[in-house]
Structures are given as structure tokens and as C-alpha cells.
Image (spheres, grey):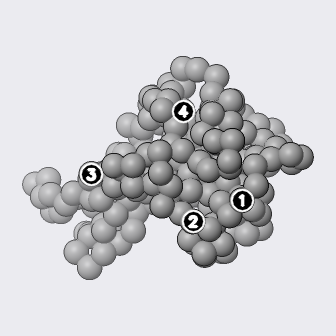
Amino acid sequence: MKTLALCAAVAAVAFVTMAQAPAADDSAAGAAMVKPDGTIVMTTQDYQRDWAFLGTFAHPGDDGVKKFNVIYTQPETVSAYRETGEFPEGAVLIKELRGSEIKDNGGGPVASLGELTGWFVMIKPPKEGGPQGPLWGDGWGWAKFDVDAPDATISTDYQKDCIACHLPVKDTDWVHVYAFPSLHQ
């Protein structure tokens, strides 16, 4: 029953988020998030409203869902990926880091998205002359932010702080594309 409630919660989140229509061309968003010294800042764009929803990961805990990750990208990135099977230069993947709220919906416990605690961001740089530094490598810029400090990444070195969670998907450009059905439609 817990599994059924968890699946229903994730499906409901996915349906509601996918119903939001992308409104603008955000192909320059990645460049706007990179400072001249190569540091990365969180976007100020309304990505939740204007960007494409890719998917949600639920991290199980002993009593239900411990946390959720909700992932967005620019609509142009989805189109390019569908055409080529690759993420284009300028692609931005934003993963919201959220807690969970578990409530009884009358039929048992249901997990839903909780409080936003931060973001994890990946930016696809140009193949030539892209940003340099410890947040850049393996074809991406990598940064993690606390919700209270979107202009100050807490990542110091992508190899130390970020890459471990992406090792299982090294062959898909370090991205968990299996969990993003909208990339494969």
C-alpha cells in the first residue's frame, strides 16, 4: 500500500507540472548563470513556469518518501535532445531539492512535495572556449545551492562534490535520462 501511495503521489506531481506550458525562449539562460570567473549562480528566471518539466525522483525513507528531486530544463533542450540524442550547448538542468510531506489522504499515507531546500544545476558549456575551473569538467558545469543563497554555490569541486551521484549514468552524458520520459517522446 505504501508503494501504491508513493507512486500515486509522484504521478500526481508529474501530471500537474507537465500541464504547465513553456512560454519563452531560454536558450541563453546558461550563459546568464555563469560569471566571468567561471562561478555559477542560480537563474533568476521563472523556470517552474516557463521551462519543461523532465521528471521527479523520490528518495525513500523508513516511513515513506524522505525527499524529492524535481528536474526542469529549457524547452529548446528537450527539442534538441529529441532530435539528436544529445544535450546542446547552453542546456541547463535544474534539480530542485525538496523535502516531503506525508499526510493521510483518507486511504493511507501519501507523500507530496515539501519545502524547497536548494538546487543542483548542470550547464552544458560550449565545446570550444567554455568556462574553466573546479566546477567545470566532463562536459558540464556543476553547482549546488542552498535555498537561502542562490548566488553562492556550495560546490567547490565537481569531482569531489557532484560526480559520484552521476557515475552510474556516465554513458548518457552524466544525466539520468532514463527517468525523463519527455526526452524520448
Query: Gap between marks 4 and 1, in whole Å?
Result: 28 Å
Asked whether 184 or 140 is in front, the reply is 140
Q: Which residue is mark 3?
A: 115
Q: Which residue is mark 4?
A: 51
Query: Gap between marks 3 and 2, in whole Å?
Result: 25 Å
At numbered mark 1, what does the secondary structure look like: helix, strand or loop? loop
Res 156 label: 2
At numbered mark 3, what does the secondary structure look like: helix, strand or loop? strand
Asked whether 121 or 146 is in front, the reply is 146
- First reached walking from the N terminus: tag 4 or tag 1: 4
Residue at 38% over, 37% down: 16
Q: Where in the figure is residue 8, as x and y percent of width and height?
A: 33, 54
Q: Amino acid at mark 2?
A: Thr
Seen in the image, is 174 located left or right of residue 145?
right
Query: Gap between marks 2 and 4, in whole Å?
Result: 27 Å
Residue at 75% over, 49% down: 131
At numbered mark 4, what does the secondary structure look like: helix, strand or loop? loop
Other residues around mark 2 within 10 Å, as few (<14) / some (14–19) / many (≥20):
some
Q: Which residue is mark 1?
A: 133
Seen in the picture, residue 124 relative to 6 is either above or below; the reply is: above
Contact between marks 4 and 1 (CB within 8 A): the answer is: no
Q: Where in the figure is residue 94, as x and y percent of width and height?
A: 53, 47
Other residues around mark 1 within 10 Å, as few (<14) / some (14–19) / many (≥20):
few
